[in-house]
Amino acid sequence: TIPTLTMNDGRSIPQIGYGCWQIPEAEAPGLVRQAIGAGYRLIDTAAAYGNEAGVGRGIREAEVPRDQIFLTTKIWNDRQGPDAAGAFEESLSKLGLTYVDLYLIHWPCPQRRLFVETWKAMIRLRDEGKIRSLGVSNFTEEHLAVLVGETGVTPAVNQIELHPYFQRRDGRAADKDRGIVTESWSPLGRGQELKDPTIEAIANSHGKTPAQVILRWHTQIGCIAIPKSANPKRIVENISLFDFELTADELDRIAALDRKDGRIGPDPATFC
Ligand code: A2P
């Protein structure tokens, strides 16, 4: 079984999930069913991934009851503001579900100044029972301060780019101070960090793969990781992590891999 974390709203979330970014709509039902069959209970998608219908079908067709699945989706940038509730209803209808477990603001888009209004719409949808937990993605401490200051409602989760070459110590500390769970996107650095010699050496000493070492690291530093794979063998590999543990020395060696220029994705201060 997969360990879970308790969020600040009292609900629990699995520490490993199946990431659906770049999963084509047509392949999504089969891959999601496969992931659930392999033991994944957290499924992460977004309106912007263009596969909500396929992901929802995979969940509905899986041989696991809906209430044992934790489904995350996200509102895209161009739907923030007055239209936020409409965007959510569209996602829900594509998914073919009656609620989502976690709904995230995908990017803060600080220049547009719409995330507070978006958040207020999400709070109403939660009160209506259509969203279980509320969260954000790619928020810095600055954005969190505005969001919480203006609404008094702290996100349960902040999903940010995080991998061994981009470890986000300040971001993780800021989330932790507010009681927010940090979720790592591109946890494997899009696969680039699997060839790192330190990661390879640690993997060899445990008889594990580099991906398993990196994903175990995410869980041991208290984060949630949502690796994407379209390959059945790697889908299983990425969840087979809980029969070994990294030592304090190994965690230190991975901590030393952090780089100033490790970011792969966009900068949330400007991206929209
Ligand atoms: P594939 O879908 O062919 O498995 P991230 O989640 O950090 O964005 O990384 C995703 C990338 O890493 C994808 O290209 C995926 O390719 C690859 N990947 C996922 N799991 C593994 C694994 N266990 N070993 C090697 N590559 C992997």
Image: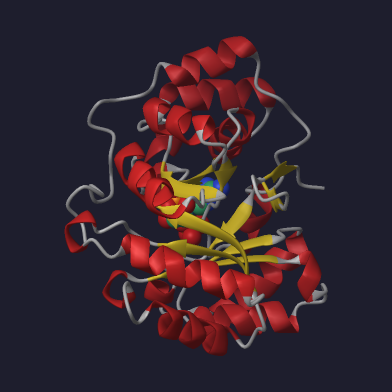
Q: Viewed as shown, does residue 94 lie left or right of 116?
A: right
Residue visible at 79% across and 65% down in the picture: 68
Q: How is the image coloured?
A: secondary structure
State whether residue 73 appears in this view: no
Residue 180 in view (yes/no): yes
Q: Which percent across, then down, holds residue 158? A: 47, 48
**Residue 202 position (above or below residue 73):** above
Image quadrant in which the C terminus is located: bottom left
263 or 169: nearer the viewer: 169
Q: Which of the 4 image quadrants contains residue 256? A: top left
Q: Is residue 186 above or below residue 174?
A: below
Q: Quadrant of residue 110?
A: bottom left
Give coordinates of residue 70: x percent, y percent: 68, 63
Instruction: Give the quarter of the image for residue 130.
Output: bottom right
Q: Nearer the viewer, residue 146 or 262?
A: 146
- At horizontal 33% and vertical 79% (from top left) the residue drawn is 82
Left of 164 or right of it: where is 218?
A: right
Relative to residue 48, is residue 5 drawn left or right?
Answer: right
Q: How many marks?
A: 0
**Residue at the top extreme?**
249
- How far across and how far down the image is residue 236, in percent? 68, 54
Q: Residue at x 71, y 83 (%)?
A: 60
Comparing 121 with 25, the one in front is 121
Reply above or below: 62 against 142: below
Residue 143, position as x, y percentages in the image: 32, 46
